[in-house]
Every structure is written in C-alpha cells, then in structure tokens.
Image (cartoon, rainbow, N blue to C red):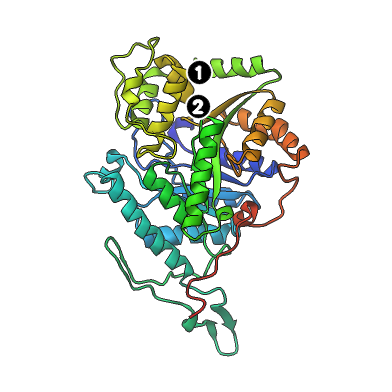
Amino acid sequence: MPGGRVVPSHPQELARSAEQAKLDAVFLADVPGLIYDTGHRLSHGLEPATLLSAVAVVTSRIGLIGSASTTLSDPYTLARQFSTLDHVSGGRAGWNIVTTYSDQAARNYGLEDTGSHAVRYARAEEFVEVVCKLWDSWEDDAVVVDRERGVLYDVDKVHALDHAGEHYRVAGPLNLARSPQGRPVLVQAGSSNVGRDFAARTADAVFVASQHLADARAFYADIKGSAKAAGREPGHVLVLPGISPYVGDTEAEARELFEELNELTVVDYGLRQLSLMTSGTRFDDVGLDEKVPGERFADAGSVTDNNRGRFQVVAGIVQRERPTLRQLLHRLAGARGHHVVCGTPEQIAATIEEWFTERAADGFNVMPPLYPHGLDAFASRVVPLLQERGLFRADYESQTLRGHYGLPRPESRYAAR
C-alpha cells in the first residue's frame, strides 16, 4: 500500500496463483469499519464485490466469493452487485452472508448498534429470501431477442416480488436477466445455534473454524443432519473448515516458521482481536506468560450447542491446551481460531485426507499465514500430493463456482407458473 494507496494488483496476483493450482475460489472477507483501532491494521479496506470484479478480468475459472452484510446493506443493491459479478465473471460469484456484530460499523450507516444476535439473524433470514427472489425474478428463458418483433424479453417471464415483510418491502423485479449460475453461491460462517440452523436451511457452503478432528466431525454431522431435516440434500450443503498450513521440508522447520512469524505479532492488536472474538472479554489483568483463566469460558457451550461460535472455538483451545496468554495470542494471530497445521507437505496432505475421509470436511478454506509465500508453498508442494492421492482435480471440469463445488444450478422459483 505505497503512500497509503490501495491497489488491486496484489489480490489479482494471488487469484492467478490460486487459479493455476486449480483451487475452487478466492474468498475476500470484509469489515465495513475501522474496528481494529490499534493503528496496526487496515481492516479489509477495499469493498469485496468491486475488488472481485477486478479479479474477474484477470482470471477465467476460479470462483469469486465476497462478504456482504445483511445488517448494513439493502437487498436490492446487494442482489444487483452479486448478480453483476456473476455475469461479469461468467458464473463464478459467491456471497458470504454475514450479519455484522460491530457497533462501530453500524454507526457508519446511521445506526446506534447492530442489534442483538437474534435480531440480526431474523433480518438475515428475510434479507436472503428477498435476494434469492430477486435473482429468480427473471426466468432463464425470459430473454428472447426477437429482432423481427423488436422484443428483447418476454414480460410474462419477468416477475415482480411485491415483498412486504417484517423488515423489508421490495417490489422487484431485478433490472437484469438471470445470471449464469441462476443464483450466486451462498456461503455462511455462523457456528452458533442460530447460525448453524440458518446455514443448514440456506447456505450452499459453510465456513467453520474447527480445531480438532472430533469437533469437526460433530459439526459436520450436525450440519448435514439439520440440512436433511430442513428438506435439503445434505450433499448440497458443503462444510469447509479453515486450515492454516505452515509448510517446511521438516516438521521442525515448519514449526520454526510458525514461531518466527508469531514473534512478529503485536500484543496490543492481538489483545484487541482476542476481545472481539470472545464477546468483549478482557484479559488486561492476565500477564502474558500466565495461564489463561479457564473459568472465563465457563459458559462457552459445545461445538454443536453454543450461542457464540468463535468464543467457543477459543474456549476449546484454552480448555484443551491450557496456554499462556502469549501462546493464545500466537495461536490466534494468523489463523484467527482456525486449524493450524505445521509440517511437511506429506503431513499436511495426510491431515487433509484424514479430515475428508473421516467425514469432518467436504473441502477446506485454506488460509496461509503469509502471502504470497504461504499460498505458493501450499499450491506447489501440497496440491500435487492431493492430486496424486485422487483427492483433488488435475484441471477444472466446470466454468462455474457451482460446478467446482459439485452443486446443481437452481431453477427460478417462478418458472413453473
């Protein structure tokens, strides 16, 4: 970011590297405010849908997933943004549905706060319903381009919503034709009780932070079971845990890289991030080399029964590993609560295979600790081993993100009318 100028070339290069490795998608998170106020980090300053459009023009196959908030957006604008991205990219768009908990971000949008967890998810339910109706409002064959009659589209196949709900009133229809995927892929990352239930009913893919194989298997089974109970095909709701790989020629070398990077972390920033991840819990009275008090996580719940997903993840680390505060900050620094794997390419590939075969994951959200080095190491050294084991494609077989994920293209809900 020379002279404070943010340029898109870095994410474009990363996306090209990921595409060369035949990865499913790149994922850009978003924080619509300067919530990390320690002066050490600019929180995802570029708006994802706009940035992913810049990424789309330098790539051709890799999926493009961006976060957008149901609390701080309106359904019509968001539906247009991601439908446009799907058109521009030829069917590679995905929306990571977030509800946003930051009151600082809320004040940027004229709100006092983001509301309670329950209120945010109630709004999200209706928000997603409206967005999907807008994406469906044009039937697939609505565009006719009849030059003799001078007709561009069949008005009988373009449908108004006339949605009047508790939170939104949207007339519709959308002002552009149905996009290549029908609907962009829906991704969700909530691990609380409400978040998991929402994901099981709504999402095509679920991002999750799982530290241990047993926890990951429990979460996987819970999501699949809930999806089936909601009348969905469980195989059409993908579970994608985050994994942060540290790759070395030996396990000791990988561990050395882990420790070297952790020594570069800033304590003030780490404490701020820890507080945000634990619903405002403070640790100012705990020395850096003192054990983190386990009693501060007494109400965290379990992997499949909790109301604060990331809080429970941190609680699991504290309960299992009994770290000092410094060790906990290091543990969360790069992976932010996701599974850290330090090892050789063979060890990392074996871990991925184990989680997949043990029904703990359908795939992974790969989160290298350092870019571009970490991505290059994973792409050049781990991916070939996964291909040799028959666990990953040698080349793309589809043009769309739904195709990469093995998901069907949904029909417009209005098509049968």
**How many neighbours does mark 1 have within 10 angstroms: few (below 14), some (14-19), or many (20 or more)?**
some
- Is residue 8 visible in the rendered structure shown here? no
Residue found at the far left of this picture: 112
Q: Decide: is 68 above or below 136.
A: above
Q: Identify the mark nearer the N-term, 1 or 2.
A: 1
- Residue 331 in the figure: left or right of residue 355: left
| Residue 257 location, quadrant | top right
Residue found at the far right of this picture: 388
Q: Position of residue 35 (x, y in %)?
A: 33, 34
Q: Decide: is 127 above or below 370.
A: below
Label placed on residue 262: 1
| Residue 107 location, quadrant | top left
The one of 15 and 123 positioned closer to us in this rendering: 123
Residue type at numbered disc 1: Asn
Q: Position of residue 177 (x, y in %)?
A: 51, 70
Q: Position of residue 238 (x, y in %)?
A: 56, 49
**How many neighbours does mark 2 have within 10 angstroms: few (below 14), some (14-19), or many (20 or more)?**
some
Q: Decide: is 89 above or below 356.
A: below
Residue positioned 40% across, 23% down in the render: 270
The one of 30 and 165 positioned closer to us in this rendering: 165
Label placed on residue 334: 2
The one of 8 and 289 positioned closer to us in this rendering: 289
Residue positioned 48% across, 69% down in the render: 136
Residue found at the far bottom of this picture: 149
Residue type at numbered disc 2: Gly
